[in-house]
Image (cartoon, rainbow, N blue to C red):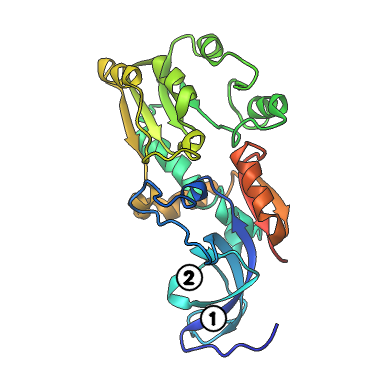
Amino acid sequence: MKSIDLKEGQVLVRTLYLSVDPYMRCRMNEDTGAEYLLPWKLNECVDGGGIGVVEASKNQAIPVGTIVTTFTWHWQTHDVVDGSLLQKLDPDIVDGHLSHFLGAVGMTGLTALLGVREKGHVTPSAHQTMVVSGAAGACGSVAGQKCQCLVKELGFTAGINYRSTDVTSALKEHCPRGVDVYFDNVGGPISDTVISQMNPGGHVILCGQISQYNKDVPYPPPLSEETQEVLRRNNITRERFVVLNYTEKHEEGLLQLSHWVLETVVHGLERMGEAFCSMMTGGNTGKQVVKVSD
């Protein structure tokens, strides 16, 4: 690429990985439904989480070769960025697997770990039952294999293929004592079904509502009157979890998460659309990322 004149404080970065996330569907709407999330604008380069390497620098704090990240990374191979917008990364934390910073050893992993810790009220040896919707990134086109993966490889007690199984019956079979904690990634009818089988005093951790993102509704989407009544009658808490409110616990959490990683990687910037659609329909296991360059 041609030479670029950098201003003081700027760096030239080359994109290594781009993050693919359900919330991006909300940014395609005129109103995202969330006060902290701005919509993408027509005729402007879209952005999201990304990781890259500094190839030229006029910022003393960020020399050439530094690995950096930001939540506003443009979907392009190279970019000129103000260094104040970037966070430096230590590749040793993830044994050189930089894409992990966009998934299990990043905001995705922290949301899951801290969400359960802070909002799930899980007590050791209490024999509680927790249900996680979208537990493999949704079941996807190879749904049966995903359920097998959940049980045999990811440590779940049981997995339910919602596309070919009656969820109500399956939940009763696998959770005979009811559900105490529900980590909600999908919303919609599946969440209504889980909540209907929750025990009094249970806790719903509201992480995502991917089944509702194609609808023009506020976030979080409104619940049915029947489901609201179940929550009230059984004194079940349903709390929205925003991981950015727990920054003081990020460092400790990331160190723990660095030992637990599983992701789905596709190669090439031209496959961003394909990766996004696959993620929205459950084609991934773990975090979906796109590798742009080596």
Q: Which mark is residue 86?
A: 2
Q: Residue at x 54, y 13 (%)?
A: 174
State whether residue 184 appears in this view: yes
Residue 89, visible in the rendered structure: no
User: Whole-percent x and y of residue 92?
Assistant: 60, 62
| Placement of 154 over or under 288, stated as above or below | above
Q: Are marks 2 and 1 in contact (CB under 8 Å)?
A: yes
- Disc 1 marks a residue whose amino acid type is Val
Q: Residues within 10 Å of mark 2 (few under 14, many from 20)?
A: some
**Quadrant of the rendering where the N terminus is positioned:** bottom right
Which tag, 2 or 1, sits closer to the chain's start? 1
As helix, strand or loop, the secondary structure at mark 2 comes to loop
Residue at mark 2 to residue at mark 1: CA–CA distance:
10 Å
Locate residue 202, reporting x and y percent.
Answer: 34, 22
SS state under label 1 = strand
Type of amino acid at the residue the image marks with label 2: Leu
The numbered disc on residue 11 is 1
- Rendered location of residue 26, percent (x, y): 46, 47
- Name the disc covering residue 235, or none: none
> Position of 243 compared to 142: left or right?
left
